[in-house]
Amino acid sequence: MLGARDMVFPYVNMLSYWVYLLAVLVLVASFFVPGGPTGAGWTLYPPQAILSGTPGSDGGIILMLVSLALFIVGFTMGGLNYVVTVLQARTRGMTLMRMPLTIWGIFMATVLALLAFPALFVGAVMMTLDRVLGTSFFMPAIVQFGEQMEYGGGSPILFQHLFWFFGHPEVYIVALPAFGIVSDLISVHARRHIFGYRLMVWAIVIIGALSFIVWAHHMYVSGMNPWFGFFFATTTLIIAVPTAIKVYNWVLTLWRADIHLTLPMLFALAFIVSFVNGGITGLFLGNVVVDVPLSDTMFVVAHFHMVMGVAPILVIFGAIYHWYPKMTGRMLNVPMGHFHFWITFLGAYAIFLPLHYLGFLGVPRRYYEMGDTSFIPDSAQDLNAFVTVIALVVGFAQLVFLFNIGWSMVKGKKSGPNPWRATTLEWQTPETPPGHGNFGEALPVVYRWAYAYGLPGAKEDFVPQNLPPDQVMAEGGEDLGAPAAQPAE
């Protein structure tokens, strides 16, 4: 998409993958040590995470923390490679404001991760020292099974601050690439330029900056000063503004466009609906007085999964359906794709909408069985069973998707080089799938932005980024704006 032959540091790119794989293997190894993997949950809160009453408090938690540290090392190598490639390896004419929004989303998410992951790395190292050497970074004076432990003076809240300083930017590390991909999918499959491109870019940048000053809205029940709660509630509402701008621009891009309801477009539209729904429930949880009674209920689970689970996964599916032809030279099977889409989309709502209601009832998260709880009606148990059945059905649909990928690679209809008639550089490669070095002997020269759709008088309803200006217009058509479209030095 940048017109580059490879990443700037291919060796580092490879090395980052192997370090990541090592991190995964270390984590999987925790299943085979005495005591098993950690039972501390994904947040790993101390002191519970490293006390002996928690499953995996010996080898399990240590391997988990070592795995986290290794993963961050691997990501740092890969992340720096992404940033340097975007800044230094763009082809001639590919200015920053001509880059596709997919690249902007990945670029900004990588910058966020490079700034946020060190906090998690430090937290993992400090908790490992608490567990192995008996230091007290996070461990207060504590009595376990009637015996005073040697810990003293540590602060469990400090770990929460370190974890969530990483944790909330992580939401946007996942979301920003999804925002960029959705922008490209909508523009291509609606045959219309993206509305407000520069505003979309600045919204990505502003979201990234604001994501570092909202982390403590995850900690309203930790006993913070009410004025801190007021501050973080305010910043949480403010960060909704650039996010809403992106939604408005997506809708305005679709307004009176030539919408093609292809599979990538269906997943993109489903993302917009799901992200808006998840974002609205985030306004509930961003308000202190509403969040406190809803904290640690299934309402939080529903919100989190709609925003961080369902919405980005819908984008990943849309991206696979969109770029699969370029990666393999074949189209995915459309009937199987529709089956996969509708079961996944409707199933996700059948799973997570009931969880919002269960949260209002007060059903807590992380409990696998309620028992005789007076304030939770028996109907909640039936709803839980319904959600479980739907989850299994949605899981089956993913098997159909995996079968489609394998089957289409062999039996799928040949796609040709540019089946979606897209403008970006990856669709203009001389070979499909792209050969070594991507672009043959000469790199492309970029003359315009990535969203030249529906240009009046043009030969086609799309104009590739690398098409010279003198080849754009139909015979007898006026060469609109050609002088201003020359490649930048």
Image (cartoon, helix red, strand yellow):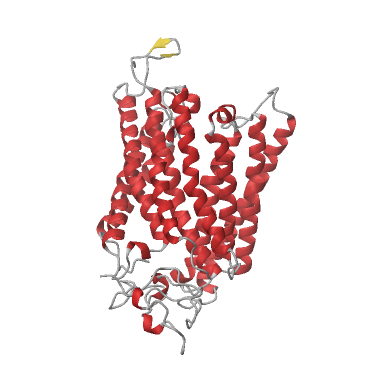
From the viewer's side, name the closer residue of 24 and 263. Answer: 263
Whether residue 7 sits left or right of residue 292 in the image: it is left
Residue at left 32%, top 67%?
A: 94
* 395 and 291: which is toward the camera: 291
Residue 287 is drawn in which quadrant?
A: top right
Is 241 in front, or is 89? 241
40 to 83, vertically: above or below: above
Q: Please give the name of the residue rendered at 46% of the width and 43% of the height, measured from the top-left corner.
A: 239
Q: Residue 87 at x, y = what percent?
A: 28, 59
User: Split into 4 quadrants, where in the image is the N terminus?
Assistant: bottom left
Note whether residue 268 is visible: no
- Label count reads 0
Counting from the top left corner in percent of width and height, residue 308 is at 51, 45
Image quarter hosting the C terminus: bottom left
State the image quarter where residue 452 is shown.
Answer: bottom left
Quick check: 461 above or below 132?
A: below
